[in-house]
Amino acid sequence: MIQITCKDAVLGYEDGIVAEGLNFIVEEGDYLCILGENGSGKSTLVKALLGLKSQKSGEITRHTKGIGYLPQQTIVQRDFPASVREIVRSGCLSGSGLRPFYTKEEKQRADETMQQLGIDHLAKRCYRDLSGGQQQRVLLARALCATKHLLLLDEPVTGLDPKAQLDLYEMIARLNKEGVTIIMVSHDVNAAVRYASHILHIGSRKQLFFGTVDEYRNSRVGQSFLAAGGLDDEQS
Amino acid sequence: MMSSLEKLVDYFVNYSFVRYAFVVGLLIALCSSLLGVTLVLKRFSFIGDGLSHVAFGAMAVAAVTGLTNRMAIVLPVTLLAAILLLRTGQNTKIKGDAAVAMISVGALAIGYMLMNVFPASSNISGDVCSTLFGSTSILTLRPLDVTLCVIMAVVVLAIFLLFYHKIFAVTFDESFAQASGIQANLYNFIIAVVTAMIIVLAMNLVGSLLISALIIFPALSAMRVFKSFKSVIICSAVISVVCAAAGIILSILFSTPVGSTIVTADIVVFFGFWAVSAITGGKRA
Ligand SMILES: Nc1ncnc2c1ncn2[C@@H]1O[C@H](COP(=O)(O)OP(=O)(O)OP(=O)(O)O)[C@@H](O)[C@H]1O
Ligand SMILES: [Mg+2]
């Protein structure tokens, strides 16, 4: 079943176009990785896919309601009083309709997700007092609570330590095997080709590639980018 | 001390207007503090200010046209302004705070001018003063006002309890809430409507100049000390109700203006909490 279709979409802000000619579909169970340089419009595309921002022209259709979203940056005010548990639970609201309280299952889902991500001991802590990586995990836990269908992650591994990065990749892959569709923005080409099923590569202003990982490996864009990515890894 | 207590009990038993003032005052304090947390966190602290000035302008129009039921004008106008302001807050072209300031001083100026050009009574400055500072109107409530106030307060409380988690989600992270299928715009709209209702209610209690204090101070005090949304909300509600009660009692005993006495109590509590957080926070850091 198709979950997202993007047809000839043109994205931009008041002052100009960021990316155009975006054509791809995401089917249930896919694991799509979006690659591209800084400023190529990946986050803009993510916002458009979520419906937070409208495209300049073209068509973007979502066939799922309730998408789990991990923003690249959350502008949470410094003094916002919110405990980790409150934030993670707020992910469960998507399907609650008018019900004014959380059900037992929802609370349990939040607790389990926190355990999975190793933040259960932080449950009562205040979000603003956590380290960057811990905050990232909290927001990821919230996103995981929000959906059983589609997760949209904008650079989820940023700020996580290497072990946590690996854990996170493994966990996302596991979720994907269980049937959750994943769309992930990443700068880590090697992880992308290892875990993803499809790649969308955005260049400056236009789409460079969309297809499966194998096709990407054999494409010119892919080969040059993979080579560069590999080089990066050796240097660091 | 005994005599003042006796005096108080005496007032309470014998004068219905004192009881009315208590009921209305506490309800308004409760409602405004609940919403205050959200407004402060959404960076809309000043919307209370702006709206109350709009309400003042509307009040002036109502007074000039000689309408007996002023609410009929004040409530819709304030509602409209609230919706407009919260909407421009999201608009990137006009900055939210500038829009609030614009509407706020505009309404104030026009309201004052109207009151002067078409004086409804001979005592203009008295009228203006009581609208701005709420001076005595809380002590002149009629049963109808009280009923209206109770109904509105119950509606506000019900909305707040019913949508508590969604209001939290929308306040904390609007994009995420929207993405996960919560209609953020709907809840922003609800917040705007409830804010307008509270402003109109609170005009009777503290007058339109001091409403912001009722909204902001309890929330800021609670945020000094507590770290989760729920505890901040509960604490701010408690602070607000206690301060309102203390303010009304003190103002009766010492015949000070009700509104400013309540706000003074809020300020005192704020500094108390600030000191507490400075001491405990210093230890932790
Ligand atoms: N709110 C905005 N208003 C105007 N221009 C914007 C806005 N947000 C982003 N842009 C511009 O759009 C372009 C794409 O930004 P975007 O955030 O989508 O990049 P990105 O691919 O996610 O980059 P990164 O890898 O650094 O996250 C950039 O040139 C940026 O300057
Ligand atoms: Mg980005």
Image (cartoon, rainbow, N blue to C red):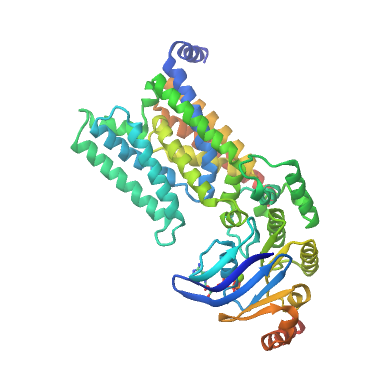
The relative height of residue B57 versus residue B182 in the rendered view (above or below) is: above
The relative height of residue B207 versus residue A5 in the rendered view (above or below) is: above
The residue located at (38%, 34%) in the rendering is: B207
The relative height of residue A222 versus residue B20 in the rendered view (above or below) is: below
Which residue occupies the foreground of this view, A70 or B49? Answer: A70
Ligand 1's quadrant: bottom right
**Is residue B41 something that shows in the picture?**
yes
Q: Position of residue B210 (x, y in %)?
A: 41, 37
Which residue occupies the foreground of this view, A217 or B252? Answer: A217
- Considering every residue shown, the one lying at the far front of the view is A1
Tell me how many marks there are: 0
The residue located at (75%, 41%) in the rendering is: A104
Is A89 situated left or right of B198 in this image? right
Q: Name which quarter of the figure residue B68 lies in.
A: top left
Q: Position of residue A75 (x, y in %)?
A: 58, 59
Which residue occupies the foreground of this view, A74 or B169? Answer: B169
Q: Position of residue A219 (x, y in %)?
A: 70, 87
Q: Position of residue A71 (x, y in %)?
A: 63, 62
Which residue occupies the foreground of this view, B127 or A88? Answer: A88
The residue located at (40%, 22%) in the rendering is: B144
**Is residue B250 something that shows in the picture?**
no
Q: Name which quarter of the figure residue B196 lies in.
A: top left
Is B243 situated left or right of B51 in this image? right
